[in-house]
Amino acid sequence: MKKALSIILAAGMLLTALAGCGSTSSSTPASTAGSASAPAAEGDYAGQTLKVAAIETAYGTQMWEDVVAAFEAKTGATVELTMDKNLEDVIDPSMKAGDFPDVVHLAVGREKAMPETLIKENALEDLTDVLSMNVLGEDVTVGEKIIGGFTGNTTTNPYGDDRVFLMPMFYSPCGLFYDAGLFETKGWEVPETWDDMWALAETAAAEDISLFAYPTAGYLDAFTYAMMAEAGGQDMFNRALNYEEGIWETPEMTQMFDVLTKLASYTEPSVPSNANGDNFTKNQQLILDDKALFMPNGTWVVGEMADAPRAETFKWGFMALPALEEGGDRYSYTFFEQCWVPAGAENKELAKVFISYLYSDEAADIFAASSAVQPIAGMTDALSEENQLFYAVYDDGAKAAIGTFAATDPVEGVNIKDAMCFTMDSVVSGTKTQADWVAAVTAASDALRAALK
Amino acid sequence: MQKNKARSRFIVACVAPAVILSIIFLVIPTFNVFRMSLFKWGGYSPNKEFVGLNNFITLFHDAKFFQSVRNSILLIVVVTVITIGFALVFAAILTREKLKGQNFFRVIFYIPNILSVVVISAIFSAIYDSNYGMLNSILSIFRGGDAEPIYWLGDQKIVIYSIVGAMVWQAIGYYMVMYMASMSSISESLYESANLEGASRIRQFFSITIPLIWTNIRTTLTFFIISNINMSFLFVKAMTNGGPDGATEVFLSYMYKQAYTNSTYGYGMAIGVVVFSFSFALSAIVNAVTKREPLEF
């Protein structure tokens, strides 16, 4: 009897241990509350289930829950919503096992690089036909609603042709943030050209204020993209994004590296110490404390630092990059998030309908209430005054730079963002020179050109 | 006979869970790492391309990989020597000397071991902070208030040693307690007779204490070196994420970046294979070098 019992116990132990790692039910309770009570037979998609995975960011989770509930009410479909701050870690195991979500809202440029990997592996669904679909419940196509330039760039069309694989979602202008209050009290003018900037650097240095700080070197991507466009125009910017041979030694790009190197010499010296995922807010704090004047960032920084202490007269200011010469073009990089459909998704048709719904006035209003702005004309009117100031940067004459480095086959050990942005840390601390920087970017660019899709 | 059969069935049933679990979670994944290191694969799609030993050839021409090897070896050597050295000395003092508040010290030394690495990293990030950190504040007493602060986590020549500091602090207590346990089992009579012979405390430490706990030191040494590879990844991930500009990249942080951020999963696995073989070889070497006839008393 005892033996039998111990065998049963041992078997039970094994089973429970295995069961712990077997189940992968990842649907969050968030959506089920709405879907369980929704009448299932209303729309054309009643009875179908759509798996949506969305990254939880500074905008919060409520807007996605509301949009999903509204979509369920409209179509009768059931949506399983998964949200997490580290979304990759949540959906990655089942994706590796071949079980894909139908719609994923997750931007490129994150450390885990999930969409980039899927692009490199040709594992995304072609969404070009979504542009000609009518927005769910409206008489206008998705393509007509999206502001021009947000599709057809190297981010949404990663293979450099007319096929769209990533749909543009919430956007935010990136540029330089500063303390407008400090400029008022000191009577300084906000610089319009880089020459003004260097002059200001000397003035500020006399008061022990550094010119520049960056949260982590990774934030310099938007900055360098805008600088490339500013130095060489949109055409050269695109050629650089496609790793054109010899482009980094041209006079235009040399001008860009000159600005970056000079900026490094005016950077607050403690910045590299805190330029990592855990301490980057200390670098952002430098602006709030008036220890540094400018930092490259996106509009989310206002919410991110909402509770941080600040100088008494502090007031957020935001501008596009200064021009290289008097009257020259000023650029602001447009960061936008994307949503996409994995090629392995089961319910692609409904996934596309869902995406079309994301551009409806109804959904856009829900998103805008959480300050997440869809690239739809007129959306910025619904924003708070402070946020409107940021989005007005393009109305004030700045040009928009859109796009990312073109997709390539993965190249072992080569990462152009590392070479382009993170070398800044070494230039600030003096261990590398501008020549090293150009050489690193050129080497990475050459290696990636050979692997272009 | 019947009884024997039942007995072996019982043994099989008892051992089976552990064996099955270790096969599923240890043997198969390890085998998979070796297999996948031969493929060019991003990690998600079914498009795996067999490339033979190409990943390894690329690896041996990758300057950033060698930087991570250098950093890892430096951490293994420096952290191990300092930690084990200090742990031995502290253990000897706490067991052999009559100190007031021995138990208090024992607890204090052990506390870092209870804390999670992330907490320790946060504490040390605060200590190392160049503008408001404790370390620079204390040093400014000697260097003067106007001296340029030392950038403990920003200066590429110093930052790896800043990580050493945090790792040593974290590990010392655990090993100290291990050594204290074996030191307290050494017979008091040996020390008494050494005293009568006129041997100094230091002489006693090297001639009695160390030889008699040698087996313990050997085991902990191997154990420590292997855990060091994992711990350095955790510390680097939480304190610097490999930065500034790769100055603190170690084996596993570089592997992580290649496997995920750079979408070269197969290449990441090749790094995994090298790390696996490296730690195996290192443990074997350490084991062979430290082999002595066990002393008994």
Image (cartoon, coloured by chain):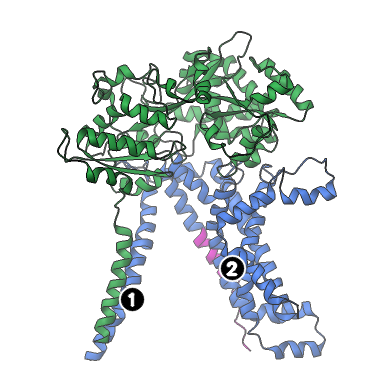
Chain colours: A green, B blue
- B239 displayed left or right of B16: right
Residue A314 visible in the snapshot: yes
**Quadrant in the rendering for residue A164:** top left
Residue positioned 34% across, 49% down in the render? A93
Quadrant containing the N terminus of chain B in the rendered view? bottom left
How far is disc 1 from disc 2 in space, using C-alphas? 29 Å
**Range of the magenta residues?**
B279-297
**Viewer-side residue, B93 vs B259:** B93
What chain does mark 2 sit on? B
Disc 1, SS? helix
**Residue type, numbered disc 1:** Val
Query: Is B293 one of the magenta-colored residues?
Result: yes
**Viewer-side residue, B4 vs A180:** A180
The numbered mark, 1 or 2, whose residue comes first in the sequence reads 1
**Residue type, numbered disc 2:** Leu
The circle on residue B221 is 2
Coordinates of residue B224 in the picture (x, y in percent): 57, 65
Q: Which residue is mark 1?
A: B15
What chain does mark 1 sit on? B
